[in-house]
């Protein structure tokens, strides 16, 4: 038998072994059924695979990984496939398999006294929130894709979201993990301990690793007291330079009860109100910048509304806030948040869009926005910057839209050019090229460009130690 035929035969045998490991319900190889697992969220990449495996248990994941390790078959782990860096879809060569955790969707345990919850990797983020709410607790991770993204993917990308300011990102919410290693063994690290000073904190290696070191199959997560009072305000500013002074005052005034602090530009409001049904501008007069602010307390009758009112009055007297309104109902508060959520969706209808997810020190947010706006406008007159996001933690989603009437396809082809421009400014301020979206495939060249050599060396050493055959999400995060 020729080498080519031998390889084909081995591949066929391996696929049958994989199918036997998960059964008919867990095995997909029909092209039409595989399609949704092969396409990246924004349509930037479309991969190929021999099959999609959908295990229903950690044991089945371990069986799949063992077979793939023996046959050197690449594995592309995938949760809800809502990532924005191309990390969850396979490469175009079709040599590997996609491992979807969608069927691993059990809540294993909720302990309200311990303020912890243990869930499998495929549990939808919104369902984790609901399980916590059912026992009068809060799981604070919240982001736009929470109705479809899975907690395993959130962990693997170290997701951020709107509540990082108060509760930290995903890394701060994980107490323990269960992980299938690249050789098929299972590391059982599902501990609910807040203090465990017994050497290296192994779980942190898998958080944010984007499936390149192992497959997260379950997690024990931190819960918090459920807020009893939430107050939301929509504030107008005349200058972006005032935004971080306002943030500092809000933190001081609230005694660290500030839950969210989101920056929105006038362009963002215009996009949302124009393109998304039901989105309205809360203020009669138009201003260049806005802040969506939320304070919350786990105490009933905490006085937080009075705190917010006093803070707003003092900020207006100081000239930082030009106008503003405090939500009088939950419905009105949801309307404020709909602006923030709607502007993300509305970008699809505003021509070509090149997106960046950067972070800088909190004190330099306004400086970055002004510098980036000037740089991109000098490079392409008429370009439309859209800076928004969780600036209370230094994270700016800095997106730029094509000039009105310009060819969207031609503009998007300049992605690398504008990314370099924006990233150079962020890195010049001791910032980061990825605040919460991860590296995946989209930013791996940028990571190699901007990371110090010693950091890249250490990352490669870790990768080689865990996955010497390079079968776990190969080619993602790190260049080969």
Image (cartoon, rainbow, N blue to C red):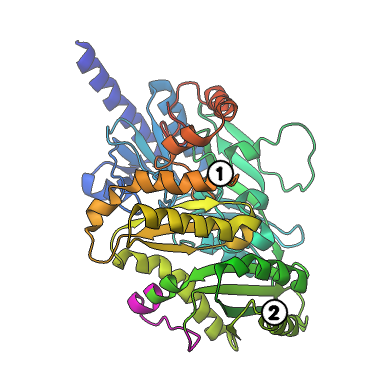
Q: Position of residue 327 (x, y in %)?
A: 59, 85
Q: Is residue 275 magenta?
A: yes
Task: Kindly identify which residue carries mark 2.
Answer: 318
Q: Position of residue 301 (x, y in %)?
A: 77, 84
Q: Earlier in the sequence, mark 1 or mark 2?
A: 2
C-alpha gap between disc 1 and disc 2: 32 Å
Residue lying at 22% horizontally and 49% vertically, measured from the top left: 32
Q: Is residue 323 above or below residue 342?
A: below
Q: Position of residue 337 (x, y in %)?
A: 51, 75
Question: Is the Cβ of the residue at disc 1 closer than 8 Å to that at disc 2?
Answer: no
Query: What are the residue bounds of the magenta stretch?
Result: 271-285
Looking at this view, is 200 or 392 the one in front? 392
Is residue 381 at least partly visible in the picture?
A: yes
| Quarter of the image that includes the N terminus | top left
* Nearest the eye: 285 or 41: 285
Residue neighbourhood size for the residue with mark 2, other residues' Cα within 10 Å, grouped as few (<14), some (14–19), many (≥20): few
In the picture shown, does residue 79 fall above or below 400?
above
Q: Give the side of residue 452 with respect to residue 278, left or right.
A: right
Q: Residue at image x 45%, y 74%?
A: 266
Assign a secondary structure to mark 1.
helix
Q: Nearer the viewer, residue 284 or 107?
A: 284
Crowding near the residue tagged with mark 1, few <14, some 14–19, many ≥20 C-alpha atoms within 10 Å: few
Query: Image quarter for residue 458?
Result: top right
Q: Which residue is mark 1?
A: 428
Side (left or right) of 172 relative to 215: right
- In the image, residue 305 above or below residue 470: below
- Badge count: 2
Instruction: Provide the secondary structure element on which disc 2 rests.
Output: loop
User: Residue 194's x, y, as percent?
Assistant: 77, 48
Residue 235: which quarter of the image? bottom right
Q: Quadrant of the C terminus?
A: top left
């Amino acid at each position: 038998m020729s080498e080519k035929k031998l390889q084909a035969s081995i591949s066929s045998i391996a696929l049958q072994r994989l199918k036997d490991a998960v059964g008919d319900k867990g095995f997909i190889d029909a092209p039409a059924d595989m399609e949704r697992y092969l396409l990246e969220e924004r349509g930037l990449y479309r991969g190929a695979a021999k099959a999609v495996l959908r295990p229903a248990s950690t044991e089945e994941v371990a069986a799949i990984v063992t077979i793939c390790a023996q046959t050197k078959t690449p594995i592309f782990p995938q949760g809800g496939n809502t990532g924005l860096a191309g990390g969850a879809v396979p490469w175009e060569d079709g040599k590997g398999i996609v491992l979807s955790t969608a069927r691993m969707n059990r809540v294993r345990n909720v302990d309200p006294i311990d303020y912890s919850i243990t869930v499998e990797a495929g549990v939808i983020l919104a369902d984790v929130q609901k399980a916590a709410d059912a026992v009068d607790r809060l799981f604070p991770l919240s982001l736009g894709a929470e109705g479809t993204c899975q907690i395993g993917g959130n962990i693997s990308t170290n997701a951020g979201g709107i509540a990082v300011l108060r509760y930290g990102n995903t890394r701060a919410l994980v107490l323990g993990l269960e992980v299938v290693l690249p050789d098929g063994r299972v590391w059982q690290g599902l501990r609910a301990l807040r203090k465990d000073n017994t050497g290296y904190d192994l779980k942190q290696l898998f958080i944010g690793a984007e499936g390149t070191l192992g497959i997260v199959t379950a997690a024990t997560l931190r819960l918090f007291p459920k807020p009893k009072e939430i107050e939301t305000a929509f504030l107008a500013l005349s200058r972006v330079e005032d935004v971080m002074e306002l943030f500092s005052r809000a933190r001081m005034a609230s005694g660290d009860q500030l839950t969210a602090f989101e920056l929105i530009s006038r362009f963002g409001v215009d996009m949302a109100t124009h393109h998304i049904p039901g989105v309205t501008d809360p203020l009669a007069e138009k201003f260049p910048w806005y802040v969506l602010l939320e304070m919350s307390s786990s105490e009933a009758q905490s006085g937080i509304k009075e705190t917010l009112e006093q803070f707003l009055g003092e900020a207006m007297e100081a000239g930082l806030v030009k106008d503003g309104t405090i939500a009088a109902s939950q419905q009105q508060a949801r309307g404020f948040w709909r602006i923030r959520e709607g502007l993300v969706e509305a970008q699809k209808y505003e021509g070509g869009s090149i997106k960046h997810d950067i972070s800088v020190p909190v004190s330099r947010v306004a400086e970055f926005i002004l510098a980036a706006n000037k740089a991109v406008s000098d490079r392409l007159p008429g370009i439309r910057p859209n800076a928004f996001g969780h600036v209370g933690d230094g994270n700016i989603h800095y997106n730029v839209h094509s000039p009105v009437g310009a060819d969207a396809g031609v503009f998007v082809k300049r992605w690398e050019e504008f990314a370099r421009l924006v990233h150079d400014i962020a890195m010049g301020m001791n910032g980061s090229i990825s605040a919460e979206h991860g590296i995946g495939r989209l930013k791996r060249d940028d990571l190699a460009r901007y990371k110090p050599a010693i950091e890249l060396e250490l990352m490669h050493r870790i990768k080689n130690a865990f996955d010497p055959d390079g079968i776990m999400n190969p080619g993602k995060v790190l260049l080969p």
